[in-house]
Amino acid sequence: MQAGDLDNNGFAGGAIRIGFRNMEIPPENQGVPITIKILLKLYENDAGVPTLKETGPNTGVFDGTIEYIQLNQLNTNADGTANTRTADMATDLTEDTVIILDGDYTDEDGIRVDYVDRDEQGQLNVVSARADAPTHSGSISLDQDNYKQADTVKVELEDADLNVNNELRDVYTAIPVGTNHANVNRDTIARTGSDPTMDPSADNAESGLLLEATFDDNRWISCTGGGNPGFGTLIGSIRETAPTSGIFVADFQVPPRYCTPDAPNAPETTLGKDLEVSYHDYFDGAGERNEVGDVAGITSFTGSVSLDRSVYPVPFADGNDVTSNAVFAYHESLDSAATETHVSGGDVVIHIQVNDKDLDQSGSGTDTLTLAADDPATTNVVEPSTLTVEITRGSDTATPASASSLGGTAVRETSPTSGIFELDLDIVWDDGPSEGCPPGEFTGGCLLQGDIITVTYRDESDATGNVNTVTDSATFDLRNGVLQSDKSVYIIGSDMILTLIDPDLDLDNDGKQSYSLDLIEWDSDAATLTMGDGGQHPAVFDPEPAKLQETGDSTGIFQSIVEIPESIDGEELDRGEEITLEYTDWGPSGADYVGEEHQDIRLQVFTSNFGATIELDQKVYTWTDKVFITIVAPDHNFDSSLIDEIGRDATDPLQVSTREGKIDNYRLAETGPDTGIFTGEVILTGFGYEGIEDVDITPRGPSGDGPTDGLLPATDDDGITVSYEYSEDETVVGSSLIRWNIGEAEWLAASYPASGTGVIRVIDPDMNLNPEAVDNFAITVISDSVASGISLTVTETSKAAGIFEGTVFFTTTDAPTGSRLRVAEGDTITAEYDDTTLPDPHSRGDELTISATALIGTIVPPLERVPVSNLRVVDNFGSTLDTVQVDQQVQVTADLTNGQTRDQAFAYLVQIQDEDNVTVHLAWISGSVAEGQSFSPSVSWTPAASGTYTATTFAWESVSNPEALSPPVSLEITVS
């Protein structure tokens, strides 16, 4: 057999793995796994003989596992020895050997295994391996530094020594209370069966205590009277997070009260106390007993109470109780015994809110607060953390009936973790004290202006841990109402935003109230009635919404949009009619209660009377024109969201007329929603006139309903009139003339090239015979080359334009035909037609030839026909001179160039002036320059004295016709 080696694989959470390798296997055992035995030593003492198994055939490698259990206060007896269950786990010579450790085993004290090996020489040798099994210092922590009641506390305990089973998660369970309240370890995690009378301060090996909790250093236990569970009951157990983690967690909820061993039946509040969890470490890292802990404070909060308002309206009775003195009619005019004429639902709703985090004690679900039933004025007994409500008048108090009926009722939390508690109470008109009520008006209690409502919250523990009482109060008051409208003048049929401002009607701060429009009376010449159902005609006002509705929560502003009707019960409203709107305020400022006195709040508005204006798009029309009518009538913009119409009804008739006919009740339409501008069209259809060649005029109409289908005949010396009765006996009129016109003709250019095109334009509105179509007619175009000319059709540029254009194509070779006209350079072209629709002083049947001319050829600007250039002074031989001598004859010459397509006659003038601008010489010469040629004329000058002279030349048509052919050109001449 070869010498073997013993391997130490070390400590691994309660288990030591050992191996033996390099062993020579006898031939008879080869191919089959074998086992060997070694000696286990613990602190130099024999602790067992583990068995090692070969890992496979012929490997020579043997493995085995030794498990160990570290003793603690839960698996020992009071004398520190392993209890029966722990001892039963320790076996010898099994597949996995289990040993029990009672402290720190490291270094030379560690776990050792010995193997006696026979070497190659046959000698026996002992080979060994050692492993450490240390103890560990435990720690415990809370997840927060401060908690409030009902918070969840998370505990984390870390100690590898408590990991006694590597294959399962270890769990340590608290000792239940049961019936043995004398057990000092009750409501802790401790050894089961520990001595119930043992001093808990004793060594934890004896007491068996592992984990406990205290409030202000007093152990927290369950109260004997029940209802306040202790630490062990709430925590239940502490559980390892994983099989080998050595980390244990648990959680519990902070209770509102707790008991201690010294006072097991006297619960104390946890508010303001220090919560401590303590872990009793059986062996710390040094193998010694130790205690560690963590502390957190249980904080408390100062509670508060608040009302939703500082001022409440004085409540009044319900309309169904018409015998009550606190009932009032919608409007004074409706005062009767009829229930439906009275305002209903006069209770005032108050909203109370208590904010105290200390009351949020349920881990899930909502908590409650008790509303005290007793009047604080008559009892001194108030339960902890309670709410009371009272109404006071001077020294007299009363509890509202709703609060009394709800006495002892739980006020519920708004959400599971809010700590906010809300209560809604209805305060009725007789909830106040009976003392001081007006005699003969109230038979019991009454609620008057100036009364005070107070809510009181008794806080069991404020931020300092003391009992505290907090209050909030509000008064009952009456205020004056205000009636408003968005405008003072309204178009009949338009909408009015009616606003009533009266905080006395805002009965609930947490909702919108609404009231019948019968609160408002309408008074005008047309009718006097309330505007709701009580007035019997609510539909005429078309209210939206149907009632006066509050604009938002607790605004005290009530609105409705009502229509200004055209008539009420068959009676028409006039333009400019005054309307008085009246609201009866039954609780004005200064009154003691609603209905004691009243005040009428009035608002004056008017129907509009803006009048109307008529505008026609032209001052003068022709006989077949289109007339555009515009009427500005703001009073008839009845609906701002729709397109209105005017003129159709007998109440606002519109008439369009000429001498030849009229259209009654012609309708115009609004240009858009809410413009008050109305438009329409009427076409003039002329009269039976035969004076236009090839045109048959047949008048149409009068006809049409509007706004664009009107047809109306008209003559050449006529007028059109539009009359509109915008209000009764009030009419506006607009009119324009109807006349024929003298036509005009023009070529769009002064000249055209011989092979180009020309455009002739004719302006004659009278030939716009159909404004709904594009018209045309024929004119004559002639040239010098073709005297007979051509017939050209000119076409209207657009419908109803009265402007006509035609295009002529010029040719120098082809015969004239259609729109093609033969021309030659220099021809004059003429376009003409006979205008037979002439205004005064002409008569029907008169004719006037309308014509326009243009040239064929290139047109040169006048001052560019013969431009003058290169003005100079030369001698008799033509040489240019820079200076001239006195008495020397010279020639003043220049170049003239004819840029035209024809010969040009000219006069060449030379003017010479001295330094004083005195003309000393003037001479000229006449001649002609051929087409496209140049010529250099000159005139002679002999200076008589030295000096500086200016020579200026002019090119004219002739001396008798001084039309310039070129701009003047000047030259300075020095004579010495």
Image (tube, grey):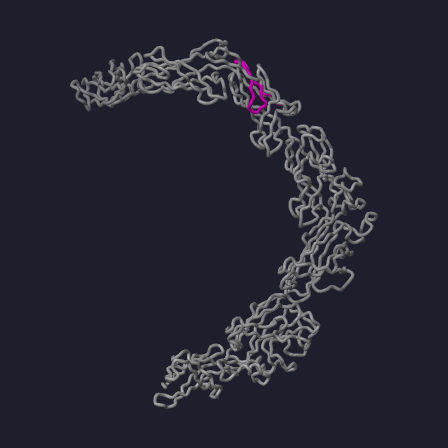
- The image shows residue 354, relative to residue 797, as above or below, that is below
Q: Is residue 919 above or below residue 403?
A: above
Query: Residue 474 placed where, x, y %?
Result: 70, 53
Q: Residue at x 59, y 24 (%)?
A: 667
**Quick check: can you spot residue 525?**
no
Q: Is the residue 581 above or below the residue 945 in the image?
A: below
**Outermost residue toward the right in this view:** 440
Which part of the image, by quadrant, shows the C terminus?
Answer: top left
In the image, residue 249 above or below residue 334: below
Q: Is residue 481 visible?
A: yes
Range of magenta residues: 703-724
* Horizontal side, residue 419 vs residue 131: left or right: right
Q: Nearer the viewer, residue 603 or 846?
A: 846
Q: Is residue 324 magenta?
A: no
Point out the residue furthest to the bottom here.
Answer: 123
Verify whether residue 715 appears in magenta.
yes
Tell me residue 727's x, y (percent).
65, 25
Is residue 388 shown left or right of residue 968? Answer: right
**Based on the displayed image, in which of its 4 quarters is residue 320 positioned?**
top right
**What is the number of callouts on the image?**
0
Is 293 situated left or right of 270 in this image?
left
Residue nearest the viewer, comparing 62 with 832: 62
Quadrant holding the N terminus: bottom left
Q: Position of residue 333 (x, y in %)?
A: 77, 37
Can you name the residue that lies furthest to the front here?
28
Q: Position of residue 286 (x, y in %)?
A: 50, 81
